[in-house]
Image (spheres, rainbow, N blue to C red):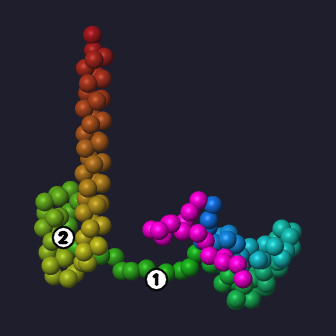
Amino acid sequence: MANSLPKRSATGQLLPGNTAAPAGKPRAKRTPREVLKAAATDEELIEMVSMGKERALGGDDVWLGWWLNRMFGTARPESAPVVIDGFDAANPVQSSVALTNAAASGKASVSQVRDFVACLKDIDEMGQMADFKAQMEEMREMLAKP
């Protein structure tokens, strides 16, 4: 029997022309989607989906659920709105104190406080942008005067 092991150097590295996988890289397994696409033509797939639609419209709960999940995604419960006493977007300092108190008392989670702070930052940036636009308009008016 011939030695089928690849030839290596004294340090264990493969020598040029040798491979550790003589048969090559194994083929990837096909996904279920690939198998289904290979088993049916586009027209057949369209016909199957149309049949499912007709069943959903005919009152089949399983098909109705399938259609709704594909159209709108899986429904997730909506959490109750977070109300933080003393939060006022027009007053960032007061809001920061209110957020700190809410986190310390457990009325708001760290991620909720982080979201509120991000909103405060965005509101501040919008205010700065409005101020900048007003200043630019003043400058235009001043430059337009003879």
Q: Which picture quadrant has residue 142?
A: top left
In the image, 9 versus 25, the foreground residue is 9
- Neighbours of disc 2 within 10 Å: few (<14), some (14-19), many (20+): many
Residue 16 rendering spot, x and y as whole percentages? 59, 59
Q: Which residues are magenta?
A: 1-16
Tell me if I can see residue 70 in this picture: no
Residue 79 rendering spot, x and y as whole percentages? 39, 80
Q: Quadrant of the C terminus?
A: top left
Q: Residue at x 30, y 23 (%)?
A: 140
Read off the residue under disc 2.
Answer: 99
Tell me if I can see residue 103 in this picture: yes
Q: Whole-Å distance between the Cαs marked 1 and 2?
A: 25 Å
Q: Quadrant of the N terminus?
A: bottom right
Magenta residue check for 7: yes
**Amino acid marked by disc 2:** Leu
Which sits earlier in the primary sequence, circle 1 or circle 2?
Answer: 1
What numbered label is drawn on residue 77?
Answer: 1
Q: Residue at x 85, y 74 (%)?
A: 40
